[in-house]
Image: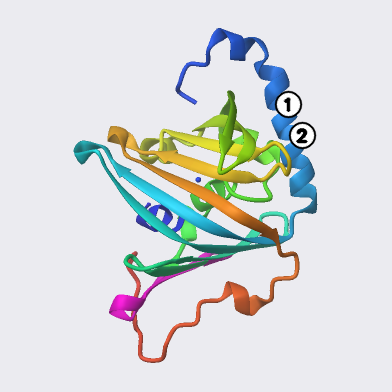
Amino acid sequence: MKLLRIALPLGGALIGMAIAAGGADSLEAVFAKMDAAAANFKGLMATVRKVSHTAVIDEDSVDTGTIAVKRPKPHDVRMVMQTDPPHATDAEFAGTKARIYYPAMNTVQEWNLGKNKALVDQFLLLGFGSNSTDLERAYSITPGGPETVAGQKTTRIVLVPKDAELRAHFPKFELWVSDDTGLVVQQKFYEPGGDYIMTTYSNLKPAPNLPDSALTLHIPKGAKVEHPQK
């Protein structure tokens, strides 16, 4: 779970009667936009702002950076996320492998997702290019209503993981889906105890032809290599 928390930077609440009355139609409209976007999604680049909230001290830690995502085929997501100083990290996901590079320590951690690949896939569903069928298979979903995020009109949806292991670590997620593009422009991951991670994406640019070099970490020679799961 540490790996997921670093990289992604993505239901149990009661929905008011007014929303519930029109909930089915609202959810179907959001799903239609997401499905249309998923059908044409190949890749994108965006600016990222991640807020990590620690409830016990009521404190926020804010990081910024960039993300590049490529989806060459269904269920094949490749991603590189770079976080700016002072908490600089470079994270790469591809297939069943993940790497996180810490420039300040000149150290790269390599992870074999192995049996956790299914959980990682569920996290990736909360990002870009996912369709409603895949989401409904993994989550119980309810509508959360219209909101404006970073100047964009969006519809918020609330997701509760069906997988008990994932739900124990992240009991609820929220996604803000653009009314114009059907892409996710904000994610909020709730953790037990009141902590959460909220990631906002801006300057989203379609990038269907991202080269492999844009999705590969460039690790300096001599960097220390660690395998935390061993």
Give the number of the disc on residue 28: 1
Q: Decide which of 189, 163 is in the foreground and name it.
A: 189
Callout 2 secondary element: helix
Locate residue 98, reporting x and y percent: 48, 67
Q: Quadrant of residue 59?
A: top left
Q: Residue at x 39, y 48 (%)?
A: 51
Label 2 sits on residue: 32
How many residues crowd mark 1 within 10 Å: few (<14), some (14–19), many (20+)? few
Is there CB contact under 8 Å for labels 1 and 2? yes
Look at the magenta stretch and give its main secondary structure. Answer: strand
How many residues crowd mark 2 within 10 Å: few (<14), some (14–19), many (20+)? some
| Relative side of 166 to 74, left or right | left
From which residue to which does the magenta span run? 93-110
Callout 1 secondary element: helix
Which residue lies most toward the bottom here?
221
Note whether 123 is above or below 33 in the view shown. Answer: below
Give the number of the disc on residue 67: none
Q: Quadrant of residue 47?
A: bottom right
Locate residue 152, reporting x and y percent: 63, 40
Colouring of the image: rainbow
The image quadrant where one finds the C terminus is bottom left
| Relative side of 55 to 148, left or right | left
Residue 9 in view here: no
Amino acid type at circle 2 is Ala
